[in-house]
Amino acid sequence: MNLLIMGLPGAGKGTQAAKIVDTFGLKHVSTGDMFRAAMANKTELGLLAKSYIDKGDLVPDEVTNGIVKERLAEGDIKEHGVLLDGYPRTLDQAKALDQAMAELGLSLDGVVNIDVAPESLVERLSGRIIHKETGATFHKLFNPPAGDYNEDDYYQREDDKPETVKRRLDVNIAQGEPILAHYRAKNLVHDIDGNQDINDVFASIVKVLETLK
Ligand code: ADP
Ligand code: AMP
């Protein structure tokens, strides 16, 4: 099964993606995670990506399309299936993905679109914390790590600071609708109410994915 998970920044894509890949055995491919890993390693890609990400802008399509296509070409994707998270983020990326998948002999089975009231997104992003060792995502209030956790083991994403969040939401709102329209025309989109508790969102997703397997 090959899937996309879509939604605005803070909608819960990464949180749900981790649960989906655990349950359905898919490979999680997150362009945001790939860029953050490259930034941490200070590679050429990382330095380039950082100049866009720090401003809340999108990394240029040709760069992003290139790293995704390279990843999709690896053998584990055909064997296990993929859940793409954070990609495509422009209509041109969606068209590039269609072409790359066709060339690689992969087909898209569904698009999980998590819908969340825009006013919730800022509080979700401003409370988001990431476990340094595993990269797992939590929220200071809505999904705190179990027990008495040590704050030093977690970090806040640089681009989750309020000044960058507004720009990210503006950019993603503008780009998102045409992408959804592209997939709605192919009857692939499944809208999920993301304004529920994390486990209830997941239960809604599982119900849809069981019909696609
Ligand atoms: P995205 O990958 O779409 O940017 P995340 O999965 O990182 O979003 O979620 C953003 C923040 O909101 C995280 O801190 C996460 O713990 C929290 N979160 C995710 N889903 C929910 C939910 N259904 N209700 C409340 N908080 C949530
Ligand atoms: P995310 O982790 O998905 O919130 O992505 C973090 C940042 O990485 C975004 O704000 C963009 O700057 C960049 N990024 C991630 N995915 C893409 C993409 N598909 N196209 C362009 N830029 C991206």
Image (spheres, helix red, strand yellow):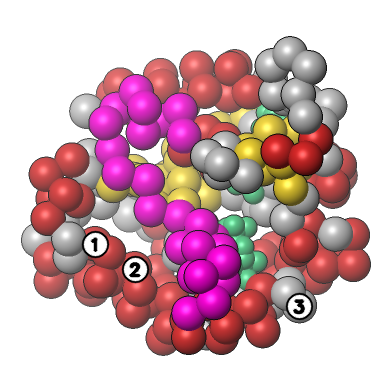
Asked which secondary structure carries label 2, the reply is: helix
Residue where numbered disc 1 is placed: 72
Tell me: 58 left or right of 139: left
Which amino acid type corresponds to the residue marked 2 in the rendered image?
Val
Is the CB of mark 2 within 8 Å of ligand 2? yes
**Residue appearing at x 52%, y 39% in the figure:** 134
Is the CB of mark 3 within 8 Å of ligand 2? no
Asked which secondary structure carries label 3, the reply is: loop
- Is residue 11 in view from this perspective? no
Give the extent of the magenta segment: 18-43
Residue where numbered disc 2 is placed: 68
Which amino acid type corresponds to the residue marked 1 in the rendered image?
Leu
**Residue appearing at x 25%, y 71% in the figure:** 70
Which amino acid type corresponds to the residue marked 3 in the rendered image?
Lys
**Residue appearing at x 58%, y 24% in the figure:** 201
Q: Position of residue 205 (x, y in %)?
A: 46, 26
Residue where numbered disc 3 is placed: 55
